[in-house]
Amino acid sequence: MSWKFCCTALLSLLVSCDLLDLVTEQADDELVFPPERWSATFRSHAQLILHELGEYLGYSPPPLLERLIEEAQKIHKQRLILQETLATAAQPRCEV
């Protein structure tokens, strides 16, 4: 597992926990928020949360079209494309 993935997962967990604390604080005392349900709710609203946070912080992402053009051209030498991955997976394995 890469360190970037670990940092992203940890950051997501921290934000989720802080938002759950805020929601619990604002909600009626008798309401219960099961962890599994909160996790699904957070996941389904993550894009909106990022958008709202970006606006609050004054973040202005680059125009979408320019970003798509730039990203689509990048070739990662160490990352196999899907066709290569499928071709490798479909090859018969040697038996020992």
Image (cartoon, helix red, strand yellow):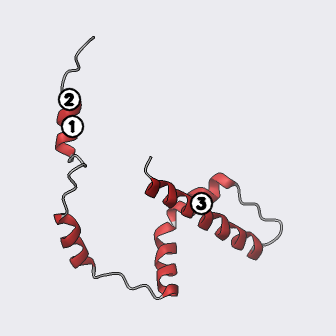
Mark 3 burial class by Cα count in 10 Å: few <14, some 14-19, many 20+: some
Tell me, yes or no, whether the two marked residues, 2 and 1, touch with CB atoms within 8 Å. Answer: yes
Residue furthest bottom as drawn: 58
7 vs 35, left or right, is left
- Up-down: is 9 above or below 18? above
| Pointer 3 residue | 13
Tag of residue 86:
1
Q: Is residue 7 above or below residue 28?
A: above
Mark 3 or mark 2, earlier in chain:
3
**Amino acid residing under circle 3:** Leu
- Name the residue carrying label 2: 90
Secondary structure found at label 2: helix
Q: Which of 30 and 94 is in front in this view?
A: 94
The residue depicted at 18 percent of the width and 72 percent of the height is 69
Picture residue at 71% right of the left edge, 60% below the top: 33
Kindly identify the amino acid type of the residue bearing the numbered disc 1: Leu
Residues 74 and 72: in front is: 74
